[in-house]
Amino acid sequence: MAHTETSLQEFLERSETPDSPPRILYPIFSSHDNFTFEAALNIAEGVGGELIVLDLLTDADSHSSETTRVSRKLLQANLDKGHTAEAHLIIEETNSPLKTAISVAQQRDIQLVVLDKHTPELFGEGLRGDAADRMRRKASCDVVSATYSRASQGVASVLVPIAEGKHCDLGAIVGGALGVGADAPVDLFHVSEEKTEAEVTRVEELFETARERLPESVELNTWHLEAPNVAEAIINESAHYDVTVIGKPTQTRLREFVTGSITATVTEESENAVLTVQRNDGEGFSFGHN
């Protein structure tokens, strides 16, 4: 399916329809990561959604025609490969790229924003949160961050570590959407230090809750591993998958600094691509929009 290209003003003024598909926003901040773009496209494809590619140019970029050609080539090349997701390209010159992306997400009811490693770092990031944190809070949307990528071309398998926490259900949904869009199987995975009878029952309930959020079109497997170190077990298994989708830590930054974070360890040491998801406090991104 061919993409459309429009100005930011025209896009923001476009009339809404009651049955609008879920919108996934992929902002390009001067540079981009091919894998993250393909992940965003596959997620949109998986939920029958609409992909918004927002190519944000700074003053320095605006004089380079190469920068504007990158986003067009991304869509032309990938939509010609059989993807049918509706896609829109917006090229906008701005001195505040992150603020512009947040504004678009606010005004057009974006359900999910996909950010890659080229997202700008912010002053005071450690105290006030990074770009993904600010996008989630200010735009009231869910966020996916490609925090690490050593991925090969394409996605043939997806690993989703499952646990409690408000971000974990989003991990299953994003992993499921990615799997459907890429025609790849999805494995829900939980690690327990000890597989007692009570623990096995608890994990089965976690898997069942995740299943209920996914349509039958997801090729889904579940498995429960006993291992003394959760992060190490996830890292070891990630070597057998193209992508790991994991929830952002829910503990405070101070506690995370003192005790460490499983998510941080996985993103730093995994041999595949890692997508870190964080859920906004609202209803959020899901297959239920279809």
Image: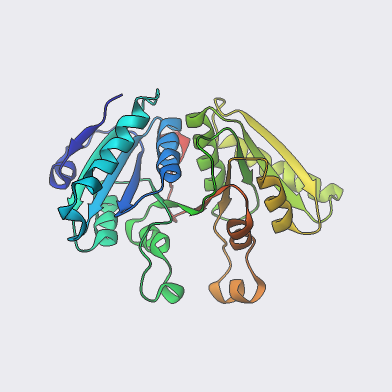
Relative side of 249 to 30, left or right:
right
Q: Name the residue at 55% across, 55% down.
A: 166
Reply above or below: 123 against 132.
below
Toward the right, the furthest residue is: 196
Give how far across and how far down residue 191 sits, in percent.
74, 51
**In the rendered image of this protein, does residue 217 appear above or below residue 277?**
above
Among the 4 quarters of the image, the one containing residue 164: bottom right
Please report the residue visible at 56 percent of the width from the left and 63 percent of the height from the top: 250
State the residue in front, 102 or 165.
102
Picture quarter with the N terminus: top left
Residue name at image x 27 percent, y 47 percent: 54
Q: Can residue 227 be seen?
A: yes
Q: Residue at x 59, y 75 (%)?
A: 257
* One can see residue 278 in this view: no
Q: Position of residue 62 (x, y in %)?
A: 17, 54
The spot of residue 233 in percent (x, y) is 74, 52
The foreground one among 136 and 183 is 183
Is 130 on the left or on the right of 156, as rendered? left
On the image, the x and y values in percent for residue 207 come to 67, 41
| Colouring convention used in this rendered image of the protein | rainbow
| Vertical comparison of 84 with 107: above or below | above
Q: Image quadrant of residue 232?
A: bottom right
User: As displayed, is residue 52 above or below residue 234?
Assistant: above
Q: In this view, does 233 lie to the left or right of 143?
A: right
| Quarter in which the C terminus is drawn | top left
Taking 175 as reference, is 97 left or right?
left
